[in-house]
Image (cartoon, rainbow, N blue to C red):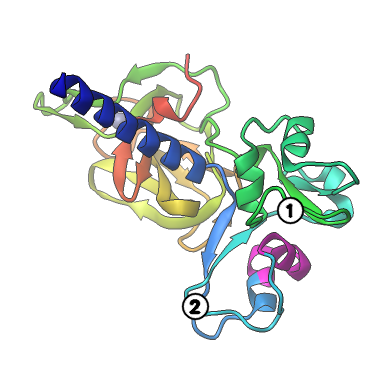
Amino acid sequence: MKKNNIQLIMTIVIMVFISATWTSSCIGMLHKVKKGETLSGIARMYDVPMKSIAQTNSLASLDRLQIGERLVIPVGTKPANAAENPGGTWYTVKPGDSIYAIARKHNIEDWKKLQQINGIDNPKRIRVGQKIFIPGKWNVGFAKPLRINLVVTSEYGYRNHPISRNYRMHDGIDFRAATGTRVYASKTGSIKYSGRKGGYGKVIEIQHADDFSTVYGHLSRIYVSSGDFVRRGQVIGLSGDTGRSTGPHLHFEIRYKGKSENPARHLDLP
Ligand SMILES: [Zn+2]
């Protein structure tokens, strides 16, 4: 009996943890305010109208930012031409609307995502005329890093290393890709690392919102530099065979707080 209870509690804990990490991977870019930063400066940096940031974060004042304050940046959103913008659109609350109905109308499964990205404290209290940011496809979840038919040549997990023959952890997934195949940013973020790094060869790491990052290894060409801001679906380099590799392929990792996770949990793979 006791054992069952413990198992039940463990299951609940694991489920809560998974849902928490999943939800956090689905909101926009988070920006932590640093000393000396202004809203206009941040708006310029992300190429987002100041008003959008103020609205998304329900900022009362445009000139008083707290150091360390976390802002949701609705990256790529330009209300003026939202129709052309895959990043998201703005919706104006009408009489009788609820956050649940608005989410349903826009095919957003989890209405809490809308609540989170718009900084709404009480979902029951939205007012007519209020602008709600509807996130577009590219700032929700992880996209495939290749646009060819995906063939997994090596799974995530422990394996006998193809070169050293040692039994060791494989922190990512390998996809078959001829040298020169375009590699796309799996999610919006900023370049944390780009260059050569040991066995990875030419590698890119993108830092995303909420402590997720993605890694693209064995590249032949790199098109981005450290600190660059990239959008989901942007070409960041070409696949290759650099570093410790047994042939042309893309090594792809998803990390949470620097620790690798199985990309198959985040991507729709064959
Ligand atoms: Zn690999």
Q: Is residue 31 left or right of residue 95?
A: left
Q: Is residue 95 left or right of residue 266?
A: right
Quarter containing ligand 1?
A: top left
Between 30 and 160, the residue placed more toward the observer is 30
Task: Name the N-terminal-most of marks 1 and 2.
Answer: 2
| Crowdedness near tag 1: few (<14), some (14–19) or many (≥20) residues, C-alpha within 10 Å | few
Quadrant that contains the N terminus = top left
Q: Residue furthest top?
A: 270
Between 126 and 116, the residue placed more toward the observer is 126
Looking at the picture, does residue 255 appear above or below residue 55? Answer: above
Kindly identify the amino acid type of the residue bearing the numbered disc 1. Answer: Arg
- Any part of residue 56 in sight: yes
Asked if the residue at tag 2 contacts the one at tag 1, i.e. Cβ–Cβ closer than 8 Å, the answer is: no
Q: Give the dominant element type of the magenta stretch: helix, strand or loop.
A: helix
Q: Which residue is mark 2?
A: 34
Kindly identify the amino acid type of the residue bearing the numbered disc 2. Answer: Lys
Q: Which residue is mark 1?
A: 125
Residue 135: x and y, percent?
69, 44
Q: Mark 2: which secondary structure?
A: loop
Q: How far apart are labels 1 and 2 at the CA level?
A: 31 Å
Q: Is residue 160 left or right of residue 153?
A: left
The stretch of residues the image draws in magenta is 43-57
- What's the residue at 30%, 39% (across, down)? 260
| Crowdedness near tag 2: few (<14), some (14–19) or many (≥20) residues, C-alpha within 10 Å | few
Q: Quadrant of residue 18?
A: top left
Looking at the picture, does residue 20 appear above or below residue 150? Answer: below
Residue 231: x and y, percent?
61, 48
